[in-house]
């Protein structure tokens, strides 16, 4: 495999983060103590999802042509974005249909197959994910497209400074309320 860069450290971290995602959903220390479980699940394991977003952004934007910290306007970059989003939409559509086929009989038998519930479900497809664990794909689609277009018009330094300011506002606002 000549010419293909290896990202062994990223691969190892992705493996660790995959285990951390499992830990988030199946807290292993809960029976031993709430404090230990809180530290593992709500502090340590919470790096996993942001890490996966960072990896996705890193690998996506490595394919994009940048000029002075901005996405170059042109057909090549737009083609790369469309291909990436189309790939994610295909995955999301497949799993949405798969789960829908599984859940419709259950909704029907439970008396939940109503017009109001179906409206809410179809709206959630575009907002929060068709099923609770598919939110990540929806967020990745919107996040990549949003970041692509922001970086097309706003210098990367300004984007980073703005992101840090919003992060600090969110952190301190939560601290005041919490």
Image: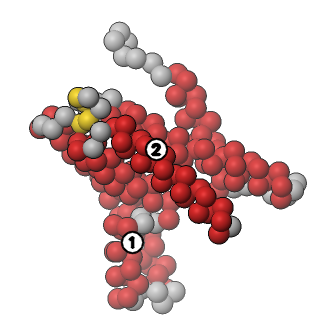
Q: Residue 150's x, y, as percent? A: 28, 47
Side (left or right) of 46 relative to 8:
right
Instruction: Using the image, determine if residue 103 lies above or below residue 30.
Output: below
Residue at 38% from the left image edge and 63% from the top image edge: 96
Report the Cα–Cα distance between label 2 and label 1. Answer: 21 Å
Q: Nearer the viewer, residue 57 or 91?
A: 57
Asked if residue 173 can be seen in this view, the reply is: yes
- Give the residue number, with chain letter if any, for mark 2: 53
Asked if residue 60 can be seen in this view, the reply is: no
Name the front one of labels 2 and 1.
2
**Quick one: SS at disc 1?**
helix
Instruction: Give the image quarter of residue 31.
Output: bottom right
Sequence order check, earlier mark of 2 and 1: 2
Q: Residue 3's x, y, as percent? A: 34, 12
Q: Nearer the viewer, residue 31 or 161?
A: 161
- Give the residue number, with chain letter if any, for mark 1: 124
């Amino acid at each position: 495999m000549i010419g293909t860069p290896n990202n062994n450290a990223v691969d190892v971290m992705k493996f660790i983060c995959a285990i951390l995602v499992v830990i988030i959903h199946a807290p292993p220390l809960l029976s031993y103590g709430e404090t230990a479980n809180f530290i593992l699940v709500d502090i340590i394991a919470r790096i996993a999802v942001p890490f996966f977003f960072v990896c996705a952004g890193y690998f996506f934007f490595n394919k994009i042509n940048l000029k002075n910290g901005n996405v170059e306007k042109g057909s090549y970059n737009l083609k790369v974005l469309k291909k990436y989003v189309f790939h994610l939409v295909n995955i999301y559509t497949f799993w949405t249909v798969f789960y829908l086929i599984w859940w419709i009989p259950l909704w029907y038998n439970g008396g939940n197959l109503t017009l109001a519930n179906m409206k809410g479900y179809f709206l959630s497809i575009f907002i929060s994910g068709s099923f609770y664990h598919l939110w990540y794909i929806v967020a990745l689609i919107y996040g990549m497209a949003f970041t692509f277009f922001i970086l097309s018009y706003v210098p990367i330094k300004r984007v980073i400074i703005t992101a840090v300011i919003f992060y600090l506002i969110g952190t301190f606002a939560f601290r005041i309320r919490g």
